[in-house]
Amino acid sequence: MTNLVYLVPLFPLVGFLINGIGWRKIPKSAGGVIGSLAILASFAVSLGIFFEVKSSGASTTVHLFNFIESGKLLIPFAFQVDALSSLFLLIITGIGFLIHVYSTSYMHEDEGMVKYFAYLNLFVFSMLLLVLGANYLIMFIGWEGVGLCSYLLIGFWFKNRDYTNAAKKAFVMNRIGDLGFLVGMLLILFNYGTLSYNEFFGQLNGGQVQLSANMYNWIAICLFIGAMGKSAQIPLYTWLPDAMAGPTPVSALIHAATMVTAGIYMIARSNALYNLAPAALNLVAIIGLATAILAASIAIRQYDIKKVLAYSTVSQLGFMFLALGVGAYTTAVFHVMTHAFFKALLFLGSGSVIHAMGGEQDIRKMGGLSKHMKITSATFLIGCLAIAGIPGFSGFFSKDEILASVYAHSPVMYYLALGAALMTAFYMFRLFFLTFTGSFRGTEEQHHHLHESPAAITIPLIVLAIMSVIGGYVGLPAVISEHHTLNTYLSSVVSNHGVHHLEHSTEWMLMGLSTGLVIVMIIVARVATKTPNFVENTGLAKVLENKWYVDELYDAIIVRPIAALSDALDRFVEKLGIDGIVNGVGRLVRWGSERVRLLQTGQVGFYIFVMVIGMALLFAIRFFGLNY
């Protein structure tokens, strides 16, 4: 089955070509079927590859052709099939298929539905290329591909100027991070002469090429800058909440299982490098922790249902990077997997709500929806319980593992991370209670049209809800079971570094503390939303509502100065300088030609006179010995 790995990205590529070329002629329903079947076929092949890798434990490089060959430099177009890539294949194609099915109903009235499915297929193709690449260059191609597709999907409704601005913002901020990734690749190529994982990590582990610790740190930091852009970490996180401009299934695809997890995948894949770069790991942990706290605090005072989930995603990504920074690589991958389930569920659930509300996204105008949308309400509640970390749900196992690893690394960082986790429980249940409980606060027309979504929407919600419950049991904590299934599966590729095991009594204490406080925060959220009073926020609440004014800060210190500099360069350098010189030369030539034209009189006597004068000048020059 491993030899057929090329089929995994090929099916979405074919789906993209069919829908992309014929999007004007293909019926909308047919476009949805083509796009969904392409991802289903990839999922089927990925499933076979996963079980083959699980049974054999082998790591295989499938060479397709030589991509770049110049002198001693050889970069093949090859796929890396191992435990890490096969796990991500299942997540991407599995969640991707459910989102495609969901989209067949959610987008059925949109005139560009076939084009939308073409973009979705291209997105999945790029993400599969990213995780399958056997070297950094193939990863980078997929990396840039998902960046392009995110631009196309976020700005899908391009007639709205705000949406196109959000797409451009995502594209530009990702390019900033990508520059760091590119520099890191060039440093690897310059120092090691290869971009292949096997060769590079082999040299690192074997010590064939000894570099200073500073160089290891610089390479790792450059790669992390790329991850900061793609996975929305401080300071390159502001594009992700604005990406809510795209259709809701796009939000689920970008924020749950695919694009934003690319940074975590890249660092987990490069764990051999980061083990040699302690300064880079510390930076990853600090940035991740700061992002988790900042984004969670902002989500507390947001009223757009998708914005709350967007900042939740930024915060959860911060938890993943915090785990990476303390050396708990497999723990971060574990949270990627569980987060894919419950965050896709929450986003698709919000889409079901928006669909029923006729496009309304303000939770202040909702309320009491559980009476009309029982399936959406029940599945959304499961997603909230999972992300809050209630025992028995998938999020509990992965988040508990992160907090335990952080506690073993630094108790101070643990308490800060616990604070972010408690804020998560508060804002998610504030969202749930304001949306699904109490009395309806919308218009009479909206209330009249409230209904449960069709099966194409509710079935993916039910499947994701089931996975949000059972998905965490592949990583039971040591106090319950010594056999961690996911750690065992990933051990041949990724293993935790420098993580100290806790005493069982300590781990029980940490689990009890976090669970008890999470329940308290849920109760606080319930009390705070029992009689909602949406007065204008003041003080810190207003600061949180305005997202700590980070966008305004960026606008003041980056956007406006660059715009002013661009305007000055356009006015003085471009128009007065470059254009002035070019136009001046043109005017000078024209003026000179007009003067020289006066010599062309048409009188033969004048021409003979000029010729005689010329001959006299030549004679004088030669006679007086002047050199010319």
Image: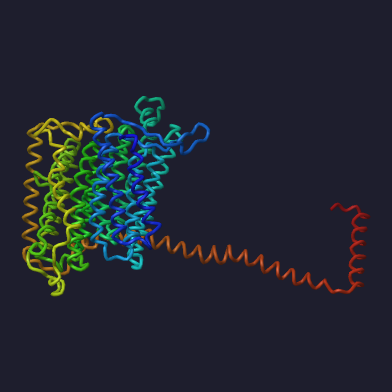
Q: Is residue 544 left or right of residue 591?
A: left
Residue drawn at x 43%, y 32% as measured from the top left: 192
Q: Is residue 496 visible?
A: no
Give how far across and how far down residue 530 sits, in percent: 6, 63
Judge whether 452 appears above or below 494 on screen: below
Quadrant where the N terminus lies?
top left
| Residue toward you, 481 or 507 | 481
Q: Is residue 616 left or right of residue 69?
A: right
Q: What color scheme is it?
A: rainbow
Q: Quadrant of residue 440?
A: bottom left
Q: Quadrant of residue 373?
A: bottom left
Q: Is residue 115 left or right of residue 376?
A: right
Figure label count: 0
Q: Is residue 526 left or right of residue 27?
A: left
Q: Is residue 515 visible?
A: yes
| Residue toward you, 411 or 332 | 332
Give how far across and how far down residue 459 sits, in percent: 17, 54
Give how far across and how far down residue 42 sits, in percent: 30, 44
Residue drawn at x 67%, y 69% as measured from the top left: 587
| Residue toward you, 506 or 396 | 396
Residue drawn at x 28%, y 36% as measured from the top left: 49
Give how far across and how far down residue 69 sits, in percent: 50, 36
